[in-house]
Amino acid sequence: MHIASILTTLVDKIGHLPPVLIYVTVGMLAFAEAAIFIGFVLPGETAVIVGGLAASQGHVNIVALCFLVPVAAIVGDSVGYYVGERHGHHLLKLPIIRHRRGAIDSALAQLKLRGPLYVFVGRFTAFLRAVMPGLAGMSRMEYKKFLIANAAGGIVWGVGFTLIGYLSGHALDKVERYMGRFGIVLLVAVVSFMMWHHIHAKRKQRAFEQAYEAQHPDSPNEN
């Protein structure tokens, strides 16, 4: 029951934090992911899932969290939109952005092609979630269209990942109490799939960037 024990320990440690600190931390990370590009370092969904785990043990209120996370994400994305609109081309020169130029250019092309739909879909990919609002502002997408698509994605993403954490927390006791080894195998399978999906997405993004740079040798690089 090693993995279940790790998750239980994590939940217990979170439980020693003041509820206000949990709300503030989760809300700020959801806000800052696109507003200041912190999503390159720490995907906001990680904090949201941890918040859901805390709610499952009664440390914070699940309803309050399901309201806080989407609002923080939507407001943060709006800040990212205006930053991109006013300073987008300068931001492209930042090292953290510049060495991903292939993926950035691809995202811009898809954004112009698909419009608000791409904003909604981008909410569920860590890289796009961090850059999409800024790219939408830089490409001069109408803010009203951006807001509608972004709000829809923010609500689905925020509530969805909060509930994933919440339900996972409730499942821990049942796994340990009723499901025994089968439960642990199932938990390991789910965690393994999530890790595989993350690694696969990273490799796919890297392969695309290499292909893009091969086709566009004059594109700026990190040197």
Image (cartoon, helix red, strand yellow):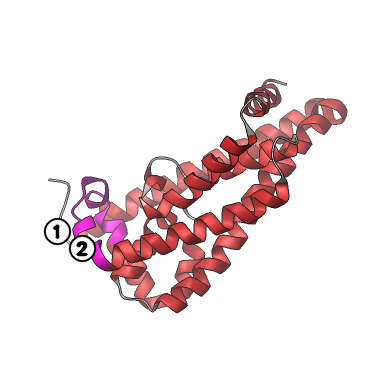
Mark 1 burial class by Cα count in 10 Å: few <14, some 14-19, many 20+: few
Q: CA distance from mark 1 to mark 2?
A: 20 Å
Q: Between 18 and 214, which is closer to the camera in this rendering?
A: 18
Q: Between 75 and 159, which is closer to the camera in this rendering?
A: 75
**Where's the C terminus, which quadrant?**
top left
Q: In the displayed structure, does residue 167 sit left or right of residue 65?
A: right
Residue 133 visible from this viewpoint: yes
Residue 30 percent coordinates (x, y):
50, 49
The vertical placement of 120 against 48, above or below, is: below
Q: Main secondary structure of the magenta part?
A: helix
Mark 2 burial class by Cα count in 10 Å: few <14, some 14-19, many 20+: few
Q: Residue 89's mark?
A: 2
Quarter of the view holding residue 48: top right
Verify whether residue 42 appears in magenta: no
Q: Between 196 and 165, which is closer to the camera in this rendering?
A: 165
Q: In the displayed structure, does residue 85 sit left or right of residue 62?
A: left
Name which residue lies at 78% across and 32% down: 183
Question: According to the image, label 1 marks what residue?
Answer: 217
Q: Residue 174's mark?
A: none
The amino acid type, in three-letter code, at marker 1 is Pro
Which is more foreground, mark 1 or mark 2? 2
Residue 28 percent coordinates (x, y):
48, 46
Q: Which residues are magenta?
A: 86-104
Quarter of the view holding residue 58: top right
Name which residue lies at 29% across and 54% down: 209
